[in-house]
Image (cartoon, rainbow, N blue to C red):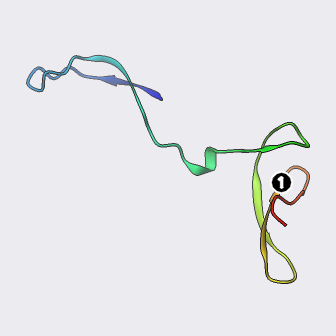
Amino acid sequence: MVKKHQKPNPQGGKQGGIVEKEMPLAVSKVAIWNPAAKKGDRIGVKTLTDGKRVRFFKSNGEMLDA
């Protein structure tokens, strides 16, 4: 939820003021919970020797899906 300052529109019957509305959230802003660090952490993607792509935590290098 974000707060948006909105102008009044008498023809549309809209009142002005500060309005709360839903907005999309960029995927880059979403963090995955790292149980080892006990906080949200950034992730990276690396390719293993067998060609499989896996995600890993940037802070400690631990793999999420092996």
**Which residue is identified by label 1?**
58
Q: List x then y, in percent, for residue 55.
A: 78, 62
Q: Position of residue 63 (x, y in %)?
A: 86, 60
Above or below, comparing residue 52 to residue 64 in the picture: below
Vertical arrangement, residue 57 with respect to residue 39, above or below: below
| Left or right: where 48 falls relative to 8 | right
Examine the image and state in which quarter residue 10 appears.
Answer: top left
Q: Is residue 33 above or below residue 9?
A: below
Quarter of the rendering occupied by the C terminus: bottom right
Residue occupying the point 87% across, 42% down: 35
Q: Residue at point 59% right, 50% down?
A: 27
Instruction: Farthest residue to the left: give it.
Output: 11
Instruction: State the image coordinates of residue 40 (x, y, percent, origin top left).
Output: 77, 40
Residue at the image position 83 percent from the left and 54 percent from the top: 57
SS at mark 1 in the image: loop
State left or right for residue 4 relative to residue 28.
left
